[in-house]
Amino acid sequence: MQEQPPSRQRRPRSLQFRQLLAAGIGLFAFLALAALALDRAFTETAEDELYRRLRNQALLLVAESEFGRGGELIPPNESVYPDARLKVPASGLYAVIALPFVQWESESAKGPELPASPLLPPNEERFEGPLPMVRANGEPSEVYRYGMGLVWPGDDMADEVPYTVYVLEDRRSLEGEMAVFRRALWLYMGAVGGVLLLLLVVILRWSLDPLRQMTRELTRVRSGATERMREHYPRELAPLAESINAFIESERRNLERQRNILADLAHSLKTPLAVLRARMDSGAGDAELRQELDEQLQRMNDLVGYQLRRAAAAGHTLFAAPIEIQPTAEDIVRGLEKVYAAKGVLCEFELDAEARFHGERGDLQELLGNLLENAFKWARSRVLLTTHSGPTATNRRPGLTITVEDDGPGIPQEKIALVLQRGVRGDERVQGHGIGLAIVQDIVRSYRGELHVGVSSEYGGAKFEVILPPGL
């Protein structure tokens, strides 16, 4: 594809636009997060207040409830209800007193289908919600419920009657409070965001004004209206103005120097050229002309070569010190044995004394850590770590083979490619993020190695083999 002409390419965005865009995104992201945090805090506060309100109403119902000599419940009179809504059918606030074989409901609970009201153990309190219910008009809804388990002692221990007092409130009351709060919250947040955005525009224009002044002065310098830039700029821009002035002066000196060099070079070349012309016109012999030509060409070559600059190429090679594997493996295993102490997994080492890891220590820690943690997670009781020094090439570092085996359930052949994908776990029921083996694979690829997954011939579980080639 043919490149687009420079004149048609889109101009880069201005610094003011970029800063305003970045600041605006950051501002609105902050306001949105702040609003979400406030919304969550208000929700938790409202739920806590609802819990306290329902609990107080339950305590009042307990205080106004009595039992007859036969253990029958004498419910509270309507005149002493803690909230008038308990008298109004389907009002949204409900009260239930549950006994072993019967339950009492407030007038407001007649009609709606409330959640089942099981008996709670004595002295147990429970705040639940939202729980599903069906309103009197058949519309599904949800309620918050507070329950308190109690025991009426009766005349003697044999007459004890367990009962539970429940107070329930429809979620729509809480949703109404939340709706009012959210409307006010987003309204105020939007107003604050608009004011802050306008303030950002003013601040950015004021802070970038020195750059605009510098641009205007550069235009004047380029047009020849002035020879240099003024030096009264803010502290951050003063070095730039000084550098530009120094660059301008340097360019002027360089231009003058180049003119002098060209003049000197022309004058210097004029002499050997004149000598050659004179010797050719003098009728000298071939041998004499050849000698003179060689001398003058060498002289001109020296003059031209004196003006040329030599280029030098430099490079560097990364040499990572060889790292012993055993200390790193022991540190990792000690930590894993603490994490999986309940399983009692035994980890054995079969480490080649000559084996070394040629790379970054962090890569070795990530490699061994993820492989061993995966083995500890799935092993029943045994894990084996094996290392072998790979083949050695002439003047090259030796390769390395790291093998981790366990006696767990293993990995089916059809799932091997799946578990190596980032974010995929072999068993969704097991806790984890599903990136450990993907990290191992990425590290192995960065060292141009190979990762093989199979079945352990010794333990029967999974086997992970990392092969790093020589010369890394």
Image: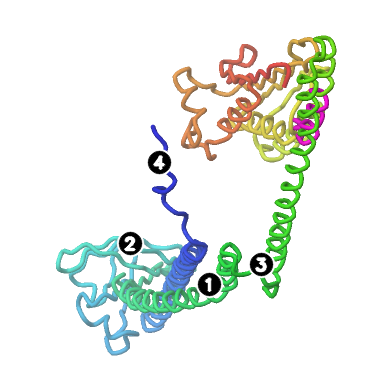
Which label lies toward us, 2 or 4?
A: 4
**Dot 3 alpha-carbon crowd within 10 angstroms: few under 14, some 14 to 19, many 20 or more:** some
**Dot 1 alpha-carbon crowd within 10 angstroms: few under 14, some 14 to 19, many 20 or more:** some
Most extreme residue toward the left, as rendered?
A: 137
Give, as a three-letter code, the residue at label 1: Leu
Instruction: Please give the range of residues in magenta.
Output: 297-315
**Dot 2 alpha-carbon crowd within 10 angstroms: few under 14, some 14 to 19, many 20 or more:** some
Which label lies toward us, 3 or 4?
A: 3
- Percent across and percent down for residue 19 are 52, 64
Q: CA distance from mark 3 to mark 4?
A: 36 Å
- Residue under numbered circle 4: 4
| Lateral position of residue 173 relative to residue 463, left or right | left
Q: Sequence-wise, which precedes: disc 2 or disc 3?
A: 2
Q: CA distance from mark 1 to mark 3?
A: 30 Å
Image quadrant holding the C terminus, namely top right
Q: Sequence-wise, which precedes: disc 1 or disc 2?
A: 2
Give, as a three-letter code, the residue at label 4: Gln
* Secondary structure of the residue carrying numbered label 2: strand
- Asked whether residue 341 is in view, the answer is yes
- Residue under numbered circle 2: 131
Q: CA distance from mark 2 to mark 4?
A: 64 Å
In depth, the one of 361 and 254 nearer the eye is: 254
Q: Sequence-wise, which precedes: disc 1 or disc 3?
A: 1
- Percent across and percent down for residue 316 are 77, 30
Mark carried by residue 204: 1
Quarter of the view holding residue 405: top right
Q: Sequence-wise, which precedes: disc 1 or disc 4?
A: 4
